[in-house]
Amino acid sequence: MAKPVVELESVVIRFAGDSGDGMQLTGGRFTSETALSGNDLATFPDFPAEIRAPAGSLPGVSGFQLHFADHDILTPGDRPDVLVAMNPAALKTNLRDLPKGATLILDTDAFSDRNLKKAGYEANPLEDGSLEDYQLHAVPLTSLTVGALKEIEGVTAREAERAKNMFALGLMSWLYGRETESTTSFISTKFAKRPEIAAANLKAFNTGYHFGETSEAFAVQYEVKPAKLPPGRYRQITGNTALSYGLIAAAKLAGLELFLGAYPITPASSILEELARQKAFGVRTFQAEDEIAAVGAALGASFGGGLGVTTSAGPGVVLKAETVGLGVTLELPLVIIDVQRAGPSTGMPTKPEQADLLLVLFGRNGESPVPVLAASTPGDCFYAAIEAARVALTYRTPVYLLSDAYLANGTEPWLIPDIGALEPIHVEFAQADGADFLPYKRDPATLARPWAIPGTPGLEHRIGGLEKQNETGNVAYDPENHDLMTQLRAQKVAGIAVPDQPVDHQEGADMLVLSWGGTYGPVHAGVRRVRAAGGKVAHAHVRWLSPFPANLGDVLRSYDKVLVPEMNSGQLLQLIRARYLVDAVGYNRVTGKPFKAGEIADAIQTAGVSGGR
Amino acid sequence: MAAEPKLTLKDFKSDQEVRWCPGCGDYAILAAVQAFMPELGIPRENIVFISGIGCAARFPYYMQTYGMHSIHGRAPAIATGLAVSRPDLSVWVVTGDGDSLSIGGNHLIHALRRNVNVKILMFNNRIYGLTKGQYSPTSGQGKVTGSTPMGSVDYPFNPLALALGAGATFVARALDIDKPGLTNVLRRAAAHEGAAFVEVFQNCNIYNDGEFEYIREDKEARTYLEHGQEFGSTGITHDESDFATAFALAQLTWEKDGAIPLGVFRDVQRDSYDELVQAQLANAKGNGDLQALVGSGDTWTIS
C-alpha cells in the first residue's frame, strides 16, 4: 500500500561517510535524479585533501550537500534537513550543522566499538539518548546490503559491503520520489566491464528503494514539485566543466586554436582533464613540468597566434607571476585562471576562499596592470571564460579570471547555451603593408598593439622583457619613454570596455551590499531573507575587479551604508575605500566553507539595515 | 615552396647594434649562425629565436627573424608552447650555462625528455657574465669569483652528461671561434627531428678569460668525433646511436684526458613531441560539435 505523500517546498540533504564510501558518487547521482525531476538545485561537495585518510577517522569524512526546491534557489543550503551518516565519524563531524528536529539516517552496522572510539565517542550515540532531538532512522545499511547481494555470484563480501552507498541512494530516492531510471542506466554503463558488480549495485539500489517503501521505519514519502525556471533545455554543470567549455567556445568564436598549459593542482586539475578529452576541438593540453612552464608554454602559444591559457590555484599562481609580467610588457593575449582555495601556502587545498584578489591585481614587480574578472556561479564560469578571452584577445593582454573551490565543484542546473547566438570575437593578425613594421604602434581605439605572428613575411621582429621604445619596440632606457610606456600600458587596461555595474535596487534602501566572485549565491540569498523580513537593502555583485565599471563610484555613493561581505580579510573593501573614498564596512570570514545565507542576513541586520525585523 | 631569391648572411642581420663586450665569444657564434641560416632554406618569417636572460640571451635581438627575449631560464618552456602549437616553424633556443642549468634546469631537462622539436644552443662560458662575474653551475670547483672569494665548493654539472641523462636525442659540442666545427654541428642539429642540445664553449674575456684556451689558441688540439671511428687513442669507437658510448665520451676532459671531443655525441631518431601531439589531434574521436558538447549528459526541458 502506498504511503502518504507530504509535499515540501525545499529540502537540504547531506550525505556523509568515509572518503572511500563513495559519498561524492552518491551525492552526484542523487543530484542527477533531482535535476531530472525538474527541481532547482545547488550542491556543495566537501571533501578532505587526503585521498584516503584512515578509515573511520574524523579527518577522513567526505560530505556532499544538496539543496533542491520547487522554486529558484541560490545556495546549497545553510543547514541540512537530513543527514545520511555512514559511520560515527560522519555523524560526529556533521551533527553540529543540523537544526533540532532534523532527520538522521544512520548505518547502525558502522557503529561498532572500534569505529566509535576512532570518532572519539565515549558512549554509543544510538543508545545514550544524545540524538533524541532528531528524527532518528537507525538502519543496518551494511548488513541489509550484504544480505541482499548474497545470491549474486562472483561478488566478494568486501564488494558487497561497498555497495551500501547504493542502498542509501535507493532509500533516499524513494523517500523523495526521485526519478530512478538515470541511476539504473548509470550503474549499468559504469560497471559494463564487470556485470556482476553492476548487478550488485543495481540490486543494492533497488533494495534500498523497496526498503523505504515497505519498512515501517519510514511512515511518509516526500514530494518536491518541479521548479519554475526559465524555459529551455537544462543540464547540471560544475564550475570547472563550464569553464572548460567556455574556453573551447572562446577559441571557436575567435577562430583560434586553444592551448592549455597546466600543472596538476587542486581544485583546478579537472579543467586540465576536461580539456585533455576535447582534442576533437583541436585543443592542445600541455601538462607541464611546473607552474612556470605551464604559463610559459601558454605564452609561447599566444606568441604563435593561439589562445594561450593556463589554469591553477593560489600556490601555482604565485609562481606564474614573472611570466604574467612578461605578458604585460610583450602585450600578448593570455588567460590565467586562478581557482582560489584557502591559503596561505598550501592552506586548505579543497576549501574555497577569495583571498587572491590583491595577489592577482598587484603580485608582480613594477607597474604591471592586468585586467581581472571573477565568475559568480558554476554556470557563469562558461560566460566568464569567454569574456576573459575576449578581453585578452582584443586588448592583447594577460587577463586573470578568478573562480574558487566552491564554484569549481559545485553544481547547478544550467540552461544550455545556444552556441550560434554567442557573439564572435574579432581577431586580426597583422600583415605587411610595405611600410616599416612598428610592433608597438597602437590601435587608437583599444591601445592594443598589432599581433604579428611568426610565419608572416615582412614582419620579422623581436620582442622581450626589456623596456621598449614606443612604436618601434626596440630596447630603450630613455627615462621619458619608460614613463610614457608605463602610462600607455595602464591606460590600455583602464580603457577596457566593461559593462556598467548593475544594481538590484530596492525602493527605500539606504544600504548596498557589494559582493564579488563565488559568493553571489549566499549573499543574494541573504539579501532576499532580509527583504522577506521587511528590510530595505540593495545588492550589487561586481564582475570586473580591474578595471572597475565606470559607474561603480556613483553606485557606491548613492547609498548611506555599504557592506562588503568577502571570504577574505577585506580585499575588495580596501580597494573601494581607497579608490572611491566611501566608508564601507566589511563582513569577513575565512572558514573554508561558503557563506551561509543566514549569516549574511545577520550581517546585513548588524550593519543597520532599515526596516524589518 | 615558391622560388625566392636565395638569402645571404646579411639577410639575417637585424638593424640592432650588437652590444656584447668587445672580444666576446658571442660575436663569433652570432656570425656563424647568421652565415649558416641561409643554408636552411627556410624563409626568415618561419624561424624563431627564443632566449631567456643573460649575455647569450640578447642573441635574438640581432637576428632578422622572429624572436623573443623572455625571462630567466624559461625559454625552453616558452619555445615548447610555440613549437607544439606551430609545428610549421623552425624554433631555436639560445641560452647560457646559468640560464639553462641553474634557474631553468627543470625546463631544459623536460624539453629534452619530451623531445620537443627545438634546437637549443647553450653558450657555456662557465661564469655569470651579465651580473658581473659570479660562479655558475659549470664553474669548476675552487673557482674564485665575486660570490666565491674562497673558491667555489660546488661540484659542477657536466652539461652533455646531463642532457644525455635527460634523454636527449641529439647532443653535440662546438667551440665559439671554430666556425667549420660549429657550422657542422648546427647543420646536424637543424637536420635532427626533435630536441637538439648543443653546448658551445664560449669565452668570456671579461670575467672568465682563457677558460677554453687549450683549444681556442691551438687549432691542432681540436679533436672531432666521427661516427664509426675511434676517438683519439681512447679505445672508444664512436657510435652516435649508443648511449653508453656517448656518455663515456662526455666524461673526457682536457685536464684529465688531454683531449676533449667536439662534434656530435648522440643522434637518434624518436618521434618528436610535436608530431605525437599532432597525431593525437588528428586521431581524436568526435566531430568537434560544440553545441553537442555543451548539451551532453542528462538533460531536461522546462517549458
Image (spheres, coloured by chain):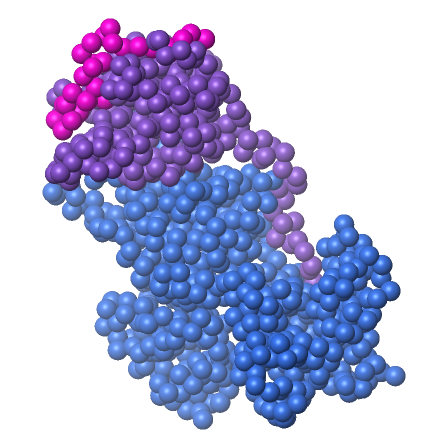
Chain colours: A blue, B purple
Nearer-the-camera pick, B255 or A415: B255
Magenta segment, prevailing SS (helix, strand or loop): loop
Give percent across and percent down for residue A372: 36, 57
Nearer-the-camera pick, A214 or A224: A214
Q: Is residue B38 visible?
A: no
Judge left or right: residue A262 versus residue B73: right
Q: Residue at x 83, y 81 (%)?
A: A214
Q: Residue at x 20, y 9 (%)?
A: B218
Give percent across and percent down for residue A511: 36, 82
Give percent across and percent down for residue B81: 43, 36
A65 versus B237 height, above or below? below
Q: Residue at x 30, y 82 (%)?
A: A560
Which range of residues does the magenta coloring cover? B202-231
Q: Is residue A320 visible?
A: yes
Give percent across and percent down for residue B4: 40, 11
Residue A85: in magenta span: no
Residue A401: name its quadrant.
Answer: bottom left
Residue B230: in magenta span: yes
A348 versus B161 height, above or below? below
Quadrant of the drawing holding the C terminus of chain B: bottom right
B182 versus A566 height, above or below? above
Residue A163: name its quadrant.
Answer: bottom right
Q: Residue at x 50, y 31 (%)?
A: B273
